[in-house]
Amino acid sequence: MNRIEALLQKKKDPILSIYYTAGYPSLQDTIPILQSLSDAGVDLVEIGIPYSDPMADGPTIQQSGTEAIANGMTLRVLLDQLQSVRSRLEIPIILMGYLNQLMQFGIEDFLKLARKNGVDGLIIPDLPMDIYEKEYLTLFAKYEMPVVFLITPQTSPERIRKIDQLSQGFIYMVSDASITGAKSMISQSQLDYFERIAALGLQTPVITGFGISDAETFQTASRYSRGAIIGSAFIKSLDSKNLAQSVKSFIASIRS
């Protein structure tokens, strides 16, 4: 069973997922951060593949991506870094990147290496669901690599149900239509949206992202979904001089 599916079946408490950028703060920090997140009890990680033209990323993630690229991070470097991870870590790993990056690498070559090196799933924000179904579904299935699709407040119920049919693992519920970034509260309009999605009775679990930054927003989002994803607030908290301790302290603050 895929590690993501196993987690969703086994875990009853809210799932805490952390997003961070590969190669930030320094090129060799990708795996130490992953190890520290696993040690701190995080359930799921999303590792961002830095890209020069990201969609919907706020200033914190954009800046981390710019620095990671300057540090020398590439898709191939990331896959190389992940080679030995499964000899010591079982935490589910999702890579988040863009279709153009995968096409430049070679999609099948990428899938082969990602599978070999322990990647459990992908988030590809610019991959249209219809194109995925027609052109890529069979190839991704060959390498048992599920794609996590995003929904937003503007996604129609019909499209959400189609995503539900195609999804494996979970559906990423973008909490609002703005860019990523830590926010101090969840608005009433967001709560109305969460309730609307919950009322659809989807067969695929939903996890919430965008604007989740602390224990309060994590707990609120988790009341309407299986858990939540924190990115910008975590990246801001990283202390390059004491990486493991900064990770431990941040996760403790969310779990408190």
Image (cartoon, helix red, strand yellow):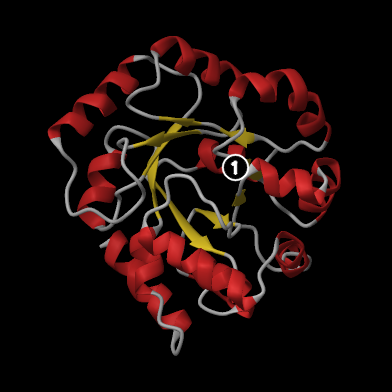
Q: Is residue 30 left or right of residue 217?
A: right
SS class of the residue under badge 1?
Answer: helix
Residue 246 position in % (x across, y down): 39, 78
Residue 93's place in the image compared with 87, above or below, is above
Quadrant in which the C terminus is drawn: bottom left
Q: Residue at x 51, y 77 (%)?
A: 25
Depth order, front residue of 60/173: 60
| Number of numbered discs overlaid on the protein picture | 1
Q: Residue at x 48, y 45 (%)?
A: 55
Residue 213 position in % (x across, y down): 28, 56
Residue 174's place in the image compared with 32, above or below, is above
Question: Can you see residue 199?
Answer: yes
Question: Can you see residue 13?
Answer: no
Q: Is residue 119 left or right of residue 204?
A: right
Depth order, front residue of 24/221: 24
Q: Residue at x 45, y 60 (%)?
A: 62
Residue 231's place in the image compared with 250, above or below, is above
Query: Which image quadrant for residue 158?
Result: top left
Q: Is residue 13 left or right of residue 131?
A: left
Mark 1 = which residue? 4
Q: Residue at x 37, y 60 (%)?
A: 59
Residue 85 position in % (x across, y down): 71, 66
Q: Residue furthest front?
A: 53
